[in-house]
Image (cartoon, rainbow, N blue to C red):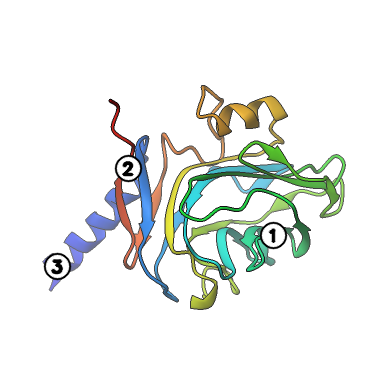
Amino acid sequence: MERLFLVHVLFTMCWAVPQDLSGKMFTFPKESDSDHVGLIPKGENYPSVTVCLRYFTDVKRAFSIFSMATPTSTNDFLLFKESNGDMELQVRYVGNTFTGLPDEQNMWMALCGSWDSVTGLSQVWINGKPSARKIGYTAGSVLNGKPIIILGQDQDSYGGHFDKGQSFIGQLTDVHMWNYVLSPCEIQRFTSDLNFTPGNVLNWRSLEYTINGHVVLENKQTPCQE
């Protein structure tokens, strides 16, 4: 029994060693109230935030894409897709809904969301198209507290209390997070998969993570070059 426990601990620790996930994706193959990926960020105090990633799904109901919670706020930074195709960005429970942005099934969608502590403004970009800028959490604030970041589920408590009706089904890749607001030029470079400055809080090319439940890390599917 002790040997089995040791093997399990070592296996879990192995996942938490930074890895270059270039060319990889997390596949969430089914609806679940437990399957998720935990991401281990750098730092605990974020004066501003930008999160960029790519997702692929055929789900038409509402689902969580990126969920960051702290001990004082389960929705410290949340990217959430509504059933009508609108994108919601919440910062410390202050949410904005962004409409009229690209919304396609069975296509890779490049998503970036940001909150600027200087102005208090939030914004999302999808496939290089910017949303209107809207007032978010209080200007001059800092997102602080030990963060728990989860892909695949919406945290309704600090690190848990998942609802399978809000779970993500599909693929996620190229997850980056910065403690500042990216310029429009940098967001366009991320969208076009060009050279860009990787995240200084989460970096897909040097990512610490844990897989919980039925989530598969696999190679990205790319079309054959003729």
Residue at the disc numbered 3: 4
In front of the other: 145 or 201: 201
Kindly identify which residue carries mark 1: 86
- Outermost residue toward the top? 195
Q: Residue 221 carries which label?
A: 2
* Distance (Cα) linking label 1 and label 2: 27 Å
Return the residue nearer the eye: 206 or 72: 206
* Mark nearer the viewer, 3 or 1: 1
* C-alpha distance separating marks 3 and 1: 46 Å
Q: Quadrant of the N terminus?
A: bottom left
Q: Label 3: how many residues lie within 10 Å, few (<14), some (14-19) or many (20+)?
A: few
Give the residue drawn at x 63%, y 68%: 83
Q: Where is residue 18 in the image (x, y as percent from the top left)?
A: 37, 40
Residue 204 or residue 17, whichever sits in front: 204
**Label located before the other in sequence (1 or 2):** 1
Residue 188 locus on image (x, y percent): 63, 29
Residue under the image location 46 percent in, 53 percent down: 106
Report helix, strand or loop for mark 1: loop
Q: What residue type is labelled 1?
A: Asp
Residue 41 visible in the current orientation: no
Residue 2 location, quadrant: bottom left
Dots 3, 2 in contact, CB < 8 A: no
The local secondary structure at tag 2 comes to loop
